[in-house]
Image (spheres, helix red, strand yellow):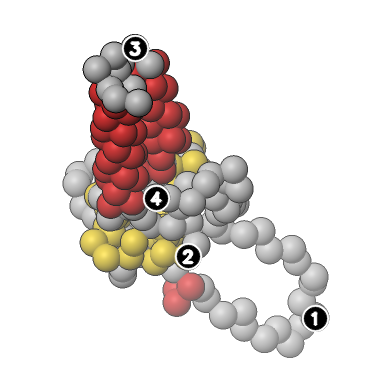
Amino acid sequence: MRPLGPILAFLAVLMLVLLAPLSPASAHDAVTGTNPDDGQNLETVPEAIDIVFTDTPLSLGSQILVEDDQGENWAAGEVEISGNTASQALKPDTPAGEYTVTWRVVSSDSHPIEGTFSFTAAGAAADPSSTPSTPASSQSPPAATTTEPTTAPMTDTAAPASEDAGPGFPIGFVIALGVLLLALAVVVVTVLARRGRTDGPGSSE
């Protein structure tokens, strides 16, 4: 019966080694970047808010609020999921000011996650429908002009998920593996115990 102690210890260590790498696989998605950045000062209100995650979130139940200092939400339409990026368009007449972005999405592991960040815009968003047309001039041909963009440049791009992240393992698989290892340990202990009784001093040759 003496060899049973080391064998049980070995099986316990083996279970820990096999199950430990599976724990991070069930972790929720994390935010890798936002556009605008948290606390960023922009020249004008952006056309959309982007949030990049480590994995592709589920579109069901996703919500992104963009509220001013009075609590009014300036988000327009539904949240769009493209790869690992959740995007929320803003109303074209969104005024300048300080904004708080409150987001809530369903992680790829089916658990809801949420967060918040803020940004400031010195100028209002441009409304394409209100841009006046240039009248034709009969006196002289129009001079060549350079038009600068009226929206803030993108500071973050939608980065893909890290290639180092391994595939996720369902919780059912982890439980089944643990039960299998436990059953194996019971079988080994039973076999060794019977062998010890058979090979003991009272056993017949």
Residue 82 badge: 2
Q: Between marks 4 and 1, how big is the CA–CA gap?
A: 67 Å
Query: Could you tell which of marks 4 and 1 lies nearer the N-terminus?
Result: 1
In the rendered image, which residue does mark 4 sit on?
Answer: 169
In the rendered image, which residue does mark 1 sit on?
Answer: 141
Please state which of the two labelled residues, at mark 3 or mark 2, is closer to the viewer.
Answer: 3
In the displayed structure image, the side of residue 171 where residue 140 appears, left or right: right
Above or below 176: residue 90: below
In the displayed structure image, the side of residue 147 where residue 150 appears, left or right: left
Q: Toward the viewer: 133 or 25?
A: 25
Please state which of the two labelled residues, at mark 3 or mark 1, is closer to the viewer.
Answer: 3
Please state which of the two labelled residues, at mark 4 or mark 1, is closer to the viewer.
Answer: 4
Query: Could you tell which of marks 2 and 4 lies nearer the N-terminus?
Result: 2
Q: How crowded is mark 4: few (under 14 residues within 10 Å), some or many (20 or more)?
A: some
Q: How crowded is mark 1: few (under 14 residues within 10 Å), some or many (20 or more)?
A: few
The x and y percentages for residue 37 are 48, 39
Q: Between marks 3 and 1, how big is the CA–CA gap?
A: 102 Å
Please state which of the two labelled residues, at mark 1 or mark 2, is closer to the viewer.
Answer: 2
Whether pointer 3 and pointer 4 mark residues with C-beta atoms closer than 8 Å, the reply is: no
Specify the amino acid type for callout 1: Pro
Asked where in the image residue 3 lies, by quadrant, the reply is top left
Quadrant placement of the C terminus = top left
Query: Could you tell which of marks 3 and 2 lies nearer the N-terminus?
Result: 3
The x and y percentages for residue 12 are 35, 25
Q: Which residue is located at x 23 percent, y 61 percent?
A: 61
Q: Toward the viewer: 34 or 134?
A: 34
- Return the residue found at the far front: 205
